[in-house]
Amino acid sequence: MKPVKVGICGLGTVGGGTFNVLKRNAEEISRRAGRQIEVVQVASRTINPDCDTSTTEVVDDVFAIVDNPEIEIVVELIGGETLAKEIVLRAIENGKHVVTANKALLAVHGNEIFARARARGVMVGFEAAVAGGIPVIKAIREGLAGNRINWLTGIINGTGNFILSEMREKGRTFEDVLQEAQELGYAEADPTFDVEGIDAAHKLTILASIAFGIPLQFEKAYTEGITQLTTADVNYAEALGYRIKHLGIARRTDLGIELRVHPTLIPEDRLLANVNGVMNAVMVNGDAVGSTLYYGAGAGMEPTASAVIADIIDVMRSMTVLPADQVPALGFQADQLSEHPILAIDECESAYYLRIQAKDHPGVLAQVASIMSVRGINIESIMQKEADEVDGAIPMILLTHRVEEQRINDAILALEALDTVQEPVVRIRVEQLN
């Protein structure tokens, strides 16, 4: 069979990795795909010194690739939303298959993109958009297709995980580790997307759609960052037998779907609690299979390239298959996506860690217990750290049983109104992941 002709838009970290792995493993890839892949054109405004493009045409206009009648698969690896959306939609309109690693594009515009692709009978591959080299999308969409997915949760941003790992292992401050993460290239100069949970929410939106068969609804995802966490909280969690991880959580409930990203205490003996550094991991719970865990490099040149190339091969294998017989982008037939409501965070239920900085006066513990009791919040354990007294105030650490978020919010307002409470109450959700 004739080689499949591919054009790559973007020759940065992921684009360069994809180009190099395609060349290095060309024979192995053709053995798997049944056809050769020929990269006939690459769009890049700068020369990537790590890529030998001497035998490949390099252009500075991405639309030269999109409009090239020879090219059958367009690989979009420039990132962002505006130009990337134009590239992808124009490629689809031209009848070309698309492979992308762009989680923000799909989380925000995926419903439109997938609808256009269905109408034109082309495929959109996006395994690399979530968790880098970990094939978690394929695992959920195809490997677990016989299951009713109950919940999934994951460490899906390596920058945040690196920061929390360093804070726990070395007692460093958030600000100190963030600076190192930027120097190492793990975090951008503006780290907002990583440390505030936006990047993770993009990925969680995609995973939830595939898991539950719902439209992509990024605007309804709850996000909370890790900037407020202190080394003290990390240490207190450890003393209680927990570790703090920045998790994305999607859960099916009788009322709707929980879709939330936030710092979370998880028991130290759970597998996810022991995922450290820049590594990613996703745990998926299905009614038939139980809990399964997918672990690996969540970013990087060649791990992400691995996922991009897997999508290219998938597209090649499906090019002779009728569109109606291809694996649906979100795992469910388009007319079978359901309109389950996405729950507001106040409606979600969790257990909670609370750190209350209160004056060391008689009766304070009774006041705290009363506030919790009248709101129907059961306390699992209390720990007071007299050794950490500051200006006459000591930290009181509470773990609660599961309760609706709204009740905890009401309790925190009441606690902060006490004249004995010196600082805002720190709240972190707790999940057992059973």
Image (tube, rainbow, N blue to C red):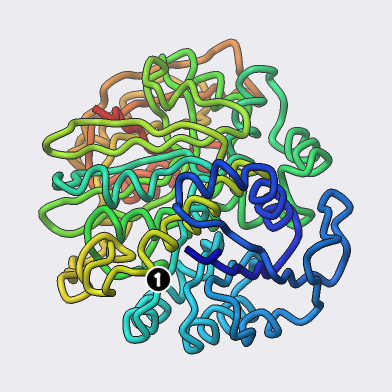
The percent coordinates of residue 141 (x first, y second) are 28, 52
The residue lying at 61 percent from left, 21 percent from top is: 168
- Front residue of this view, candidates 18 and 172: 18
From the viewer's side, name the closer residue of 420 and 270.
270
Q: Is residue 264 above or below residue 237?
A: below
Left or right, residue 413 beside residue 291: right
Q: Can residue 427 be seen?
A: no
| Image point (61%, 57%), residue name | 193
SS under mark 1 = loop
Left or right position of 326 against 414? left
Q: Residue at x 65, y 26 (%)?
A: 167
Q: Nearer the viewer, residue 120 or 209?
A: 120
Q: Residue furthest front?
A: 1
Where is the C terminus found, in terms of image quarters? top left
Amino acid type of the residue tagged 1 in the rendering: Met
Residue 41 makes an appearance in the image: yes
Q: As drawn, is 65 to the left or to the right of 206?
A: right
Q: How many marks?
A: 1
Residue 58 vertical placement versus 135 (above, below): below
> Where in the figure is residue 333, as x and y percent of width and height?
20, 69
**Label 1 neighbour load within 10 Å: few <14, some 14-19, many 20+:** many
- Residue 274 position, x and y percent, is 48, 21
Residue where numbered disc 1 is placed: 123
**Position of residue 367 measured from the top left corner of the image (x, y, whole percent):** 33, 31
Residue 38 relative to residue 145: left or right: right
